[in-house]
Image: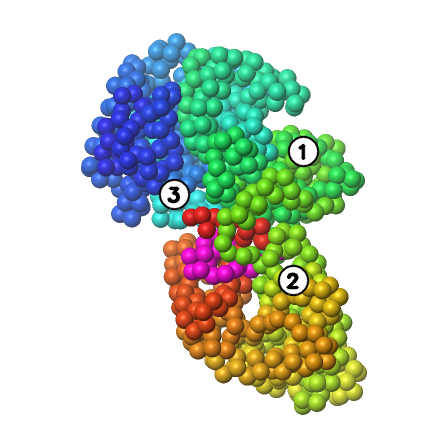
């Protein structure tokens, strides 16, 4: 049966409906369940409620239409017929799972309910039909706990506490030691907790249970943790989630039953080896929640870890063999590494989910390159498959293998990479400390979806419990955070805010280092080494460079940054901010003398002393960038940024200049501005004090000629006049630059090519680009200031309210992180079009922070810009994003 918004799968249900294959309609889980059923895999029958019903529910006052209720009843009847059981039938009950399923995978962020349909009557029927009373009552207590937490809002910790007390009273170590009578007693205690906490008894009507669970899944789309996850991962807020209702299969029916989570390749390293965990006599939540320590899936993994409990390959060879065949079939079918959930019920394998698995950047690169070699995908697909932002995981230092390590303990290497930081014991503290500039390691017994903000704030995550597929491991890998999980020697005392590892006690705020590649936890900070960008990384970058059209430059103004950018593949400098050179401690006094001078003669005297310093800066840059274009922005910031503020600074300046302190303070007061970002800065400095730009131009050309003579190859200076609003401003200042160039060329006997252009960062400049291009030989879009001046929003102050703007859908993303294509983007398009109309072939680039953002790079490709410029560590990200934009 397929209605407009309810789709069945499994059994004899048709799976040819195009909407049922559309993940925006049925979510990733729903689409893949139907797909697996259609290719003959053992999928428990069920049905999917479309995402649009979620949006309708949230928009229209949290209620359900009569049509939806009728469609769900019809779909439920299909499941009953397929399995031969009745929903709510006391003699032979059908139980179902209710799970979320958004179009984009959001692991652990939304809600699930298992074993739905159990009550005081159906539990007896389940015991009779299964022949296992213990299993039936175990399932009932699980259902009460999960439903009460997810749907009724009862603290799940109360149930965990009751279970621990019951185990202690019976001197049990593991849940599996509980008998049928033990579970019956615990069910009674659970129901008492619900009545006390919820002010109503636990619901007994299966239909009430079903609609309560559907309501909870829809509500979870708007939960705080889901909103944070979407914001962190740039997932739109208007997609909604589907609901998947599926016949239960049971991994907790004794020693011939099991449940597991597996990947067709190692999601941490990319190695072509099955990777996963399983538990005998368990349900799926047991594996990911860290309640029991899971076992290894394969014999090789067990032996590598020197673990004793048998792997699934050894303990259930037939079910494992079938699972391995399914792994290979699914990877060939989807042409990607799959993340799979499965259950074995009394020896029979059932597939509960498949999706493209989350992976580290290292694994993504390895898989993409190897799958091309295997003929599974082509180079273009490989390029499109790797998330450019994930490369950030590979571009930063790792622990020095030769550095001394004070190893406290070891856990599971759940997400690779290494990090040092201060211990914090809860997510809120992690966020507060990170916001004040501290590097923190979030240490928890186990993480939950409510910790998402703290996990994002932390540089690394350490948990005492949980396996390689725990919440902490999966989320950390997706975020690119190092993670060590299951470090069982770690004991946390929340009251005293202390951490005990073996016989060592650490306080919150003490520094530790974690290595997510080998699971080590170390005291203090461990030295790091720079990454090597070869192997799979180098191969993928070669492919990216083959298919991209735009060039990629860097924003840099030091020799070290230039070298780093060249190492990462930069093809020149897109923005050299010369003011950064002025802030050097050895020069700031000269800069202040120049600014506070009473006349041009005083300014020139200070500038003459600055000239050799500036020339030396440019020589170092040009030596690294020889033969490549280098866009150099002349002095841009307001003069007030350089002014002294403390009395000691004024005294030092008075001693250096022989002027009176009060006189200097009076002059500083004359230069004070109420809104300096819209004041005396940029080209306005050059118009009023042309000697500043004259000195900078002279330093650039003298350095370029010196390097050209020494190397035989000249750099290509592109001198950028900032904050231009009119053609006349650029015309005057181009004259200053050209005059300096000719004087230097005559004196040195060397001539080099150069361009003079401008930064388009004011709306008027964008609109008047046709006139400005009569003088300007290139445009570089300064989208940081263009965003500020277009939106009338200060980038420095916007953090107080922009989060709310994104959450309310006013902006899809922070416009200072990802370009506001609809508004600011229009100005870029207008300026590009009008500039080209005046000067055919005018060079166009972008040099704001957006130059390293993949979505903004896609816009630049669409607009036909010649290059993007990004910070050195973002150059590889920009190279890959530019290739993806070109291919798309």
Rendering coords of residue 784 (x, y %): 51, 65
Which residue in the protein does label 1 denote?
Answer: 518
Using residue 301 as the reference point, say whether residue 92 is left or right of it. Answer: left
Q: Identify the residue shown where x is 35% and y is 33%.
A: 31
Q: Where's residue 64, x and y in %?
A: 25, 39
- Numbered label tally: 3
* Other residues around mark 2 within 10 Å, as few (<14) / some (14–19) / many (≥20): some
Secondary structure, mark 3, is: loop
Residue drawn at x 61%, y 43% as measured from the top left: 538
Q: Does the magenta stretch include residue 644?
A: no
Provide the residue designation for mark 2: 627
Closer to the N terminus: mark 1 or mark 3?
A: 3
| Quadrant of the frame with the N terminus | top left
- Residue at (46, 16) in percent of width and height: 322
Neighbor class of circle 1 (other Cα within 10 Å; few <14, some 14-19, many 20+) is some
**Tag 3: Cα neighbours inside 10 Å, few (<14), some, or many (≥20)?**
many
Instruction: Tell which of 421 and 819 is nearer to you.
Output: 819
Return the x and y of residue 221 as percentages of the image width and height: 38, 43
Q: Nearer the viewer, residue 440 or 861?
A: 861
- Of labels 2 and 3, earlier in sequence is 3
| Mark nearer the viewer, 2 or 1 | 2
Magenta segment boundaries in residue numbering: 853-872
Is residue 864 within the magenta segment?
yes
Task: Say which element carries label 1.
Answer: loop
Q: Name the residue under label 3.
A: 221
Q: Can residue 451 be seen in this view?
A: no
Q: Which of marks 2 and 3 is in front?
A: 2
Give the camera-side residue of 223 and 400: 400
Give the side of residue 841 with respect to residue 35, left or right: right
């Amino acid at each position: 049966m397929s209605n407009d918004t309810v789709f069945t799968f499994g059994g004899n249900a048709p799976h040819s409906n195009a909407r049922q294959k559309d993940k925006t309609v049925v979510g990733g889980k729903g689409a893949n369940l139907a797909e697996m059923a259609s290719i003959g895999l053992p999928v428990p029958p069920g049905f999917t409620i479309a995402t649009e019903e979620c949006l309708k529910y949230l928009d229209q006052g949290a209620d359900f239409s009569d049509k939806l209720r009728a469609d769900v009843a019809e779909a439920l009847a299909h499941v009953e017929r397929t399995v031969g059981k009745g929903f709510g039938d006391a003699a032979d009950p059908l139980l179902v799972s209710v799970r979320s399923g958004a179009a984009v995978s959001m692991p652990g962020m939304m809600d699930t309910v298992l074993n739905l349909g159990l009550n005081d009557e159906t539990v007896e029927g389940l015991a009779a039909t299964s022949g296992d009373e213990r299993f039936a009552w175990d399932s009932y207590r699980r259902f009460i706990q999960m439903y009460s937490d997810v749907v009724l809002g009862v603290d799940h910790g109360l149930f965990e506490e009751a279970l621990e007390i019951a185990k202690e009273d019976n001197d049990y170590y593991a849940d599996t030691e509980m008998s049928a009578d033990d579970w019956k007693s615990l069910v009674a205690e659970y129901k008492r907790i619900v009545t006390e906490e919820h002010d109503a008894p636990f619901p007994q009507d299966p239909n009430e249970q079903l609609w309560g669970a559907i309501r909870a899944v829809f509500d979870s789309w708007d939960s705080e943790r889901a909103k944070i996850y979407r914001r962190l991962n740039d997932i739109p807020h208007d997609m909604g989630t589907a609901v998947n209702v599926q016949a239960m299969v049971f991994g907790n029916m004794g020693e011939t039953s099991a449940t597991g989570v597996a990947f067709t390749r190692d999601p941490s390293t990319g190695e072509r080896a099955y990777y996963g965990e399983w538990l005998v006599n368990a349900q799926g939540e047991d594996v990911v929640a860290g309640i029991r320590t899971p076992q290894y899936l394969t014999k090789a993994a067990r032996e590598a870890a020197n673990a004793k409990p048998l792997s699934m390959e050894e303990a259930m060879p037939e079910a494992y063999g079938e699972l391995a065949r399914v792994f290979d079939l699914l990877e060939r079918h989807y042409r990607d590494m799959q993340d799979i959930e499965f259950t074995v019920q009394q020896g029979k394998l059932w597939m509960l989910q498949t999706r493209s698995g989350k992976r580290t950047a290292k694994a993504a690169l390895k898989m993409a390159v190897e799958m091309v070699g295997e003929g599974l995908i082509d180079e273009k697909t490989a390029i499109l498959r790797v998330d450019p932002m994930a490369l950030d995981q590979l571009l930063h230092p790792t622990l020095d293998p030769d550095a001394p390590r004070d190893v406290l303990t070891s856990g599971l290497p759940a997400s690779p990479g290494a990090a040092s930081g201060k211990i914090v014991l809860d997510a809120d503290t992690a966020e507060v400390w990170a916001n004040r500039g501290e590097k923190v390691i979030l240490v928890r017994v186990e993480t939950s979806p409510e910790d998402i903000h703290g996990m994002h704030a932390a540089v690394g995550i350490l948990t005492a419990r949980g396996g390689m597929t725990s919440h902490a491991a999966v989320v950390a890998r997706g975020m690119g955070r190092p993670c060590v999980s299951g470090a069982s020697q770690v004991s946390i005392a929340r009251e005293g805010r202390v951490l005990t590892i073996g016989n060592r006690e650490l306080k919150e705020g003490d520094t530790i280092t974690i290595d997510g590649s080998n699971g080590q936890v170390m005291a203090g900070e461990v030295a790091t080494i720079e990454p090597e960008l070869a192997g799979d990384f180098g191969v993928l970058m070669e492919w990216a460079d083959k298919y991209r059209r735009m060039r990629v430059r860097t924003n840099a103004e030091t020799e070290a940054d230039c070298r780093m950018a060249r190492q990462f593949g930069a093809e020149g400098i897109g923005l050299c901010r010369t003011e950064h050179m002025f802030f050097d401690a050895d020069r700031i006094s000269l800069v202040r003398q120049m600014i506070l001078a009473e006349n041009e003669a005083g300014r020139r005297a200070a500038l003459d002393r600055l000239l050799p310093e500036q020339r030396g800066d440019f020589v170092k840059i040009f030596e690294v960038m020889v033969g490549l274009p280098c866009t150099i922005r002349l002095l841009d910031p307001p003069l007030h940024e350089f002014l002294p503020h403390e009395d000691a600074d004024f005294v030092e300046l008075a001693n250096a200049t022989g002027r009176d302190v009060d006189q200097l303070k009076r002059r500083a007061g004359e230069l004070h501005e109420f809104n300096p970002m819209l004041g005396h800065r940029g080209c306005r400095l050059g118009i009023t004090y042309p000697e500043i730009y004259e000195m900078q131009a002279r330093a650039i050309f003298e350095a370029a000629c010196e390097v050209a003579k020494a190397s035989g190859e000249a750099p290509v200076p592109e001198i950028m006049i900032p904050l231009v609003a009119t053609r006349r401003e650029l015309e005057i200042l181009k004259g200053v630059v050209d005059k300096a160039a000719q004087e230097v060329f005559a004196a040195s006997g060397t001539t080099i090519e150069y361009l003079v252009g401008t930064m388009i960062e004011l709306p008027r400049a964008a609109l008047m680009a046709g006139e400005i291009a009569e003088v300007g030989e290139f445009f570089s879009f300064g989208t940081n200031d263009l965003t500020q001046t277009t939106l009338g929003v200060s980038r420095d102050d916007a953090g107080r309210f922009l989060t709310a703007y994104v959450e309310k859908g006013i902006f899809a993303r922070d416009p200072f992180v990802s370009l506001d294509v609809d508004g600011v983007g229009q100005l870029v398009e207008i300026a590009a079009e009008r500039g080209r109309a005046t000067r055919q072939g005018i060079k166009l680039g972008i040099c704001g922070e957006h130059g390293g953002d993949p979505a903004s790079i896609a816009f630049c490709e669409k607009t036909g810009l010649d290059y993007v410029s990004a910070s050195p560590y973002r150059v590889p990200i920009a190279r890959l994003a530019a290739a993806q934009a070109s291919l798309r």
